[in-house]
Image: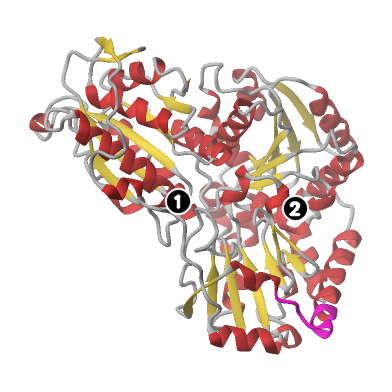
Amino acid sequence: MHTSSSHPAAAVLAAVLAEHGVRHAVVSPGSRNAPLVLALHHQPEITVHVSLDERSAAHHALGLSLATWTPVPAVCTSGTAALNHGPALAEAFHARIPLLSITADRPADVVGRGHGQSIAQAGVHAAHTVHHDALDESRMDLVELTRRARRAVRLALHGGPGQSAGPVHLNVPLEEPLYDLAPAPTLPSTSEGNLEDQADSTPNPLPIPQKLREALDRGRVVVLAGPRPRTAARSASTHLHVNMPCLAERGSGVKGPCVLFGAERVLQDGAWPAPLQPEAVITLGLPPMSKALRNALNGIPHWHVGEDLDGEGTGWDIWGTLQGSAPAEVLTWTSSPMQRDGWNQAKNHLLEATSACEEKWSDLMAWKSMTQTWASWSEKERPNALHVANSASARYAQWLDLAETCSAHATFHANRGVAGIDGCMSTALGWHAGRCGLGQTPSTWLVTGDVAFHYDSNAFLTEPSLQRHGLKVVVINNGGGGIFRWLPGTQHGEVFHRHFETPPARTVASVAQGADAKYLRATSAAELKRALEHARDEEGLVVVEVVTPNVDSADAVKTYLESCRD
């Protein structure tokens, strides 16, 4: 029997996590969480990673959860530290990713009495978790602690809408002394306690709704496939095949003859082209990123596929027209030749517009040069995992042909649950470390903007167990939040540059140096090609800064989108 913390709640939690196949934990330094840290450290099956910033730590755990599809815990001390798990929990809640936030706390009888690092922690994350609970060892015996810990893990995997995955918050009050050790407890068998802990998570078979069947028979249905984070832990061989016309986003894990990425590019005056207008929509994954696309499909009845897909669950009522769920088998429905011809014409038009876009240096041309460079490499050398930050990067990724750019079994991910720029780099680092922990050698590339890069620079404040080797970070530096130049705010010239675009005050090179990364810089397509090749051949962490002009980049996007709609 191995050693663990002398605190039963901490020892039980570590044992239950190991029992359920969790192999990673991310902890942040503190004192009140010492029993939790010691219990995890002494749990033989679990690798403990240390991340200084709790906000980054929770996103590191999010990335590890994505890679392993297990509820990886982020563990912190009491007080405001607990609040810093909030952004990652909100992302996991909306993206339906299993994640655990374990927050140490002062004993309940001292909270609210002015003791240091004590706030009202219990239930503080209730709005953005599928379950929250307190493991109070002063009031619970070993059987009850074990039952509640097992229930928390089960609900993280199947406790969301339609048995989808989601985040769970466990608050753990702990008395002093905090640093004592004891023999690890023997957990009660799963037959002890509430039977709900052993509930069958297999969904019931779903019928095809009659109204949807009629629309399918008429060939007037379109699939709207948003990102599906569950695919980040799967191989490409398990991706869904969609026969019908499909408006997809990267990360949806769909393939098929009529799959169209970046479909908002073909809207005419904000409307969907009449020949391609559907009478029903099937949604899949998260809601689409494009507001214009959502508006163009407003008012059309829709059904969601996800209840019979592990961890994905029911859909969002995006337009107030959700009719219910449909089985995944509807995705194999075959479209008519006329319908396929119309969609193929739209796809070919977008390919021609992308190929013909001007060669003036800009963000768009940097993306085009980057993907062309990757595509020129051998299958083994290409990225087999591509993470992108939100805002402009996530949109450019829809417009280029990544299928010809990355390896055949590549995965794609962006934090599109809430769609904030929080933790983009931390999530990619966690995902990369998780794949390395599975014995794989992933070629992971993160493409981010300069603002998102600086915003999450604490991602690198980790000790070495969070594997960085092999991670390549490309920073598109257009001097601030370039996506704001796509919006009407530029009309306020006197405040736009300072209050919206907001150029960072420090350099990419200084952050790279602080992270002990190899730093490369490119200001043209030729320099970018050489920098990417150099980064590919480096074994350690690499940061490639790509300097682009802000005004020209915004103009290039406007010109490109106009050409797509001609």
Residue named by callout 1: 165
- Residue type beneath disc 2: Ser
Residue named by callout 2: 553
Q: Is 474 part of what is drawn in magenta?
A: no
**Residue drawn at the location 78% of the way across and 70% of the way down:** 258
**Residue drawn at the location 61% of the way across and 72% of the way down:** 292
**Looking at the image, which is closer to me, 389 or 18?**
18
Q: How many numbered circles are shown?
A: 2
**Looking at the image, which is closer to me, 189 or 38?**
189
**Residue drawn at the location 85% of the way across and 45% of the way down:** 369
What is the x, y in percent for residue 484? 60, 56
Instruction: Look at the image and give the residue range highlighted in magenta.
Output: 333-341
Mark 1 lies on a secondary structure that is loop
Which colour style is shown?
Answer: secondary structure
What is the x, y in percent for residue 479? 66, 42
| Residue 381 left/right relative to 144 | right
How many residues crowd mark 2 within 10 Å: few (<14), some (14–19), many (20+)?
many
Mark 2 lies on a secondary structure that is helix
**Looking at the image, which is closer to me, 368 or 385?**
385
- Work out which quarter of the rendered image holds the N terminus and state it: top left
What is the x, y in percent for residue 26? 44, 27
Residue at mark 2 to residue at mark 1: CA–CA distance:
39 Å
- Please state which of the two labelled residues, at mark 2 or mark 1, is closer to the viewer: 1
